[in-house]
Image: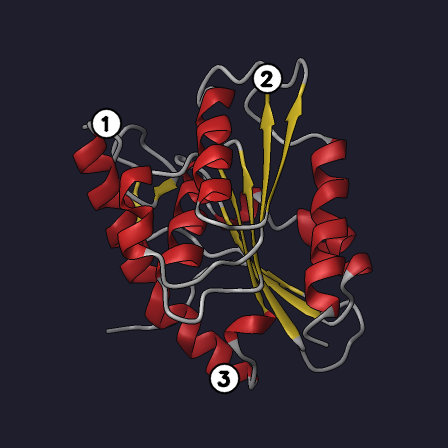
């Protein structure tokens, strides 16, 4: 099995050895190039971070292009949870290998995702031993919230950012995630952007930079 990431990388801005790793997980129908442009701006906040935007493991089954972390053909809760669990299982050995090769630990890693990538980042960050330094979830959802207590292996701080006018993943999904995470004792910050559809705006980007700076400063 090939336990490496395929996708664009950027940084560190400092030009030195990476001291942190930020994974950028794209949405369904996109690929790693969709989010890697976040890296230069965020790299100013965390200049010792390496950014990797991996291509999801499967070709998108609803379009002739792009990738997916799991299929959305069947959106029943059982199938969605099974899909995100499989995506997390795919991610785990590759993340472990990247961390080991860089001489880092899970405490040096931030998982960021958009839409389906946010669902994957949340599941992986909470369910994998060692977790990560933080999860940044934009326009996503916590799949299988009723399984969180039984499956939680880590409690990283979580940033949720969601557009109030999101027509793809309703903002109610992040509101539900906020409630469940807070009830589980997880440090969660949630920001809902009026008028924003299914996307990331400048406020969300700035919040991400501040979160990266805060959580990764602790692991420096």
Find residue 216 and report its image quarter. Answer: bottom right
Find residue 153 and report its image quarter. Answer: bottom left
- Residue bearing the label numbered 2: 164
Q: Position of residue 45 (x, y in %)?
A: 80, 58
| Whether residue 1 is situated above or below residue 210 in the rendered picture | below
Q: At x 39% / y 36%, what residue is drawn?
A: 28
Would residue 53 be seen by someone viewing this image from the given angle?
A: yes
Image check: 166 left or right of 201?
Answer: left
Q: At x 64% / y 19%, what residue is drawn?
A: 196
Q: Position of residue 183 (x, y in %)?
A: 46, 41
Would residue 144 be seen by someone viewing this image from the given angle?
A: no
Mark found first going from the N terminus, 2 or 3: 3
The CA distance from mark 3 to mark 1 is 37 Å
Image depth: mark 3 or mark 1 in front: 1
Image check: 86 left or right of 213?
Answer: left
- Residue bearing the label numbered 1: 75
Query: Helix or strand or loop: what does disc 3 sit on?
Result: helix
Image check: 174 left or right of 73?
Answer: right
Q: At x 68% / y 61%, what residue is drawn?
A: 215
Query: Helix or strand or loop: what does disc 1 sit on?
Result: loop
The CA distance from mark 2 to mark 3 is 40 Å
**Where residue 31 is drawn, which disc sits there?**
none
- Residue bearing the label numbered 3: 101
Q: Position of residue 144 (x, y in %)?
A: 29, 39
Q: At x 33% / y 39%, what residue is drawn?
A: 145
């Amino acid at each position: 099995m090939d336990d490496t990431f395929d996708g664009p990388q950027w940084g560190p801005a400092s030009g030195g050895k990476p001291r942190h790793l930020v994974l950028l997980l794209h949405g369904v129908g996109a690929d790693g190039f969709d989010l890697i442009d976040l890296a230069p701006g965020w790299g100013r906040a965390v200049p010792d971070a390496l950014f990797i935007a991996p291509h999801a493991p499967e070709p998108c089954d609803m379009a002739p292009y792009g990738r997916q972390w799991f299929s959305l053909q069947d959106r029943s809760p059982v199938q969605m949870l099974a899909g995100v669990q499989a995506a997390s299982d795919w991610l785990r050995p590759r993340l472990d290998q990247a961390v080991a090769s860089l001489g880092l630990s899970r405490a040096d890693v931030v998982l960021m995702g958009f839409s389906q990538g946010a669902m994957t980042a949340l599941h992986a960050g909470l369910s994998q031993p060692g977790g990560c330094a933080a999860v940044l979830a934009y326009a996503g959802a916590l799949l299988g919230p009723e399984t969180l207590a039984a499956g939680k292996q880590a409690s990283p701080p979580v940033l949720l950012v969601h557009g109030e006018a999101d027509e793809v993943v309703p903002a109610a999904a992040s509101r539900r995630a906020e409630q469940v995470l807070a009830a589980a004792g997880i440090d969660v910050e949630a920001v809902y952007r009026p008028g924003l559809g299914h996307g990331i705006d400048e406020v969300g980007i700035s919040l991400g930079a501040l979160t990266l700076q805060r959580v990764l400063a602790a692991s420096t």
